[in-house]
Image: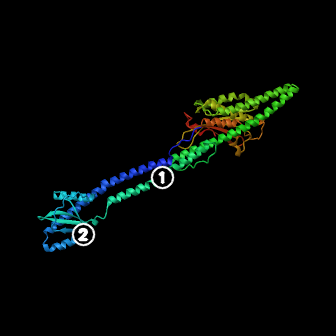
């Protein structure tokens, strides 16, 4: 016995894939924001601040001494910038203050034409300041700003967003993967139940188109398996029942033959053997009906005429008349042997139950706009009609409308079961309907495209 396949579940696998996809997208987005937005904005802001500081130093040296305190107060209040009249350039101590400060140093180098480095100091109020020496007016003027001026830190915000995204992506990926895998898990459970011989509940045919189509096909398969299981149970029960009667008669005849041989008893034995042979033959018909046959082009009208000749002797013996109604140029693509077996069973039923005028009809029937024409073949009689509520039940094996268990009067109840098996094996439709004025119509529908060379007059068909 094969073991169930092991490995990661679909939800876990999808979680990994989705998490990797989300993380990759997040990193790509972060890199794009960093490279195309934040870094250019930081460089531009650093260059603007460097320009303001250089301009402040130059303006201070050009102002009269008595107005410089007012200018310094305005810089401190409006821009948080302070000035020192004399400050030597700071040496390179190897200290790096961050990416934005590095952009500032590079901006000063471009403006001053020489290397520039910041000096960090702590003011009397405890605040941190960065100072840089700017040559202006023949002297070196120190210009500084408070570090708290740089309150916004977009890089830290980006890093925090990435970290939060990493934390949330697992939960989101698991939720989304569970939603995706849930219909497949239901399908797997239903398939496992079906494999064990149980009858699972039908799957909801909702959701995305592919999953809805998969559920639809599975439901059809489950219903067909259920029908086959019920048919098999009915078949075996009916077989045991219908074989028991002739076997009992044969046993009784054999016992009587031991006491007194009579020709009538031997005839009875031969009839019982023939009855059992016919029953087994019909069961073999059902088994053979599961194998489809290749189709070929048929001149349907001539083919129907040929079938009537096969049944002419049986029709004469039953006092029935066979009439063919079919357009002369009607064509169809069908498996002739399969179609003949179906038609023979339908004609056999009609001759048994409705020995009168029996019509064999071939029609080309137009469907909805834009769909091709299909062909149907009918056996129409004027015998006793089947009750409306039993039109589908009569296709079940051993079902007899009249309730008779006598094969001579009502047959074994396998003829229409054979018809349905053969039709399903070839993808054809078969149905019964009551006729106006009494009688029954049995139709075999060959799906499109099965007709060729159809004239417009044929599409109207014979009604």
Q: Residue 326's quadrant in the figure?
A: top right
Instruction: Judge left or right: residue 295 versus residue 149.
Output: right
- Residue at 70 percent of width and 37 percent of height: 235
Query: Residue 70 at x, y = what percent?
Result: 18, 74
Q: Secondary structure at mark 2?
A: loop
Q: Secondary structure at mark 1?
A: helix
Could you classify mark 2 by the number of other residues whose Cα lies within 10 Å: few (under 14), some (14-19), or many (20 or more)? Answer: few
- Residue at 71 percent of width and 28 percent of height: 312
Query: Residue 197 at x, y = what percent?
Result: 64, 42
Q: Which residue is mark 1?
A: 174
The quadrant of the image that shows the N terminus is: top right
**Along the line of sight, the residue nearer the viewer: 115 or 304:** 115
Q: Is residue 262 visible?
A: yes
Q: Residue 318's quadrant in the figure?
A: top right
Furthest residue toward front = 93
Could you classify mark 1 by the number of other residues whose Cα lies within 10 Å: few (under 14), some (14-19), or many (20 or more)? Answer: some
Q: Is residue 31 above or below residue 406?
A: below
Distance from disc 1 to disc 2, alpha carbons, whole Å, reads 53 Å
Query: Tag count in the figure?
Result: 2
Number of the label disc, if any, that sits on residue 123: 2
**Along the line of sight, the residue nearer the viewer: 105 or 447:** 105
User: Does the CB distance between marks 1 and 2 fall below 8 Å?
Assistant: no
Q: Is residue 363 visible?
A: no
Furthest residue toward left = 138
């Amino acid at each position: 016995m094969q073991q169930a396949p092991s490995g990661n579940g679909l939800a876990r696998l999808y979680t990994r894939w989705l998490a990797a996809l989300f993380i990759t997208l997040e990193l790509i987005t972060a890199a794009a924001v960093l490279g195309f937005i934040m870094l250019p904005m930081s460089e531009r802001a650093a260059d603007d601040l460097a320009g303001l500081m250089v301009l402040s130093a130059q303006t201070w040296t050009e102002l009269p001494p008595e107005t410089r305190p007012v200018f310094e107060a305005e810089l401190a209040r409006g821009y948080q910038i302070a000035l020192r009249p004399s400050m030597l350039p700071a040496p390179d101590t190897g200290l790096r203050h961050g990416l934005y400060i590095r952009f500032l140093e590079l901006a000063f180098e471009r403006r001053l034409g020489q290397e520039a480095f910041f000096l960090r100091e702590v003011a009397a109020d405890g605040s941190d300041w960065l100072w840089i020496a700017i040559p202006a007016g023949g002297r070196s003027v120190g210009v500084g700003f408070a570090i708290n001026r740089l309150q916004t830190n977009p890089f830290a915000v980006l890093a925090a967003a990435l970290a939060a995204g990493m934390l949330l992506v697992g939960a989101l990926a698991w939720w989304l993967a569970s939603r995706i895998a849930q219909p497949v898990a239901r399908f797997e459970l239903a398939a496992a139940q079906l494999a064990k011989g149980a009858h699972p509940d039908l799957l909801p045919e909702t959701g995305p188109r592919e999953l809805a189509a998969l559920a639809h096909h599975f439901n059809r398969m489950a219903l067909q398996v259920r029908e086959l299981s019920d048919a098999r149970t009915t078949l075996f029960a009916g077989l045991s029942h219908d074989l028991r009667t002739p076997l009992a008669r044969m046993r009784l005849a054999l016992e009587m033959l031991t006491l007194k041989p009579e020709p009538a008893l031997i005839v009875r034995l031969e009839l019982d053997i023939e009855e059992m042979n016919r029953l087994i033959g019909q069961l073999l018909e059902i088994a053979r009906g599961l194998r489809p046959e290749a189709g070929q082009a048929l001149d349907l009208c001539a083919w129907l005429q040929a079938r009537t000749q096969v049944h002419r002797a049986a029709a004469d013996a039953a006092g029935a008349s066979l009439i063919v109604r079919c357009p002369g140029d009607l064509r169809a693509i069908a498996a002739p042997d399969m179609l003949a077996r179906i038609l023979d069973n339908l004609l056999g039923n009609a001759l048994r139950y409705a020995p009168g005028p029996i019509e064999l009809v071939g029609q080309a029937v137009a469907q909805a706009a834009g769909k091709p024409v299909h062909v149907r073949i009918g056996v129409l009689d004027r015998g006793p009609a089947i009750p409306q509520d039993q039109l589908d039940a009569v296709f079940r094996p051993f079902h007899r409308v009249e309730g008779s268990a006598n094969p001579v009067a009502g047959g074994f109840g396998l003829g229409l079961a054979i018809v349905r098996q053969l039709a399903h094996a070839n993808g054809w439709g078969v149905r019964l309907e009551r006729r106006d004025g009494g009688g029954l119509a049995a139709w075999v529908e060959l799906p499109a495209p099965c007709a060729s060379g159809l004239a417009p007059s044929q599409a109207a068909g014979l009604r």
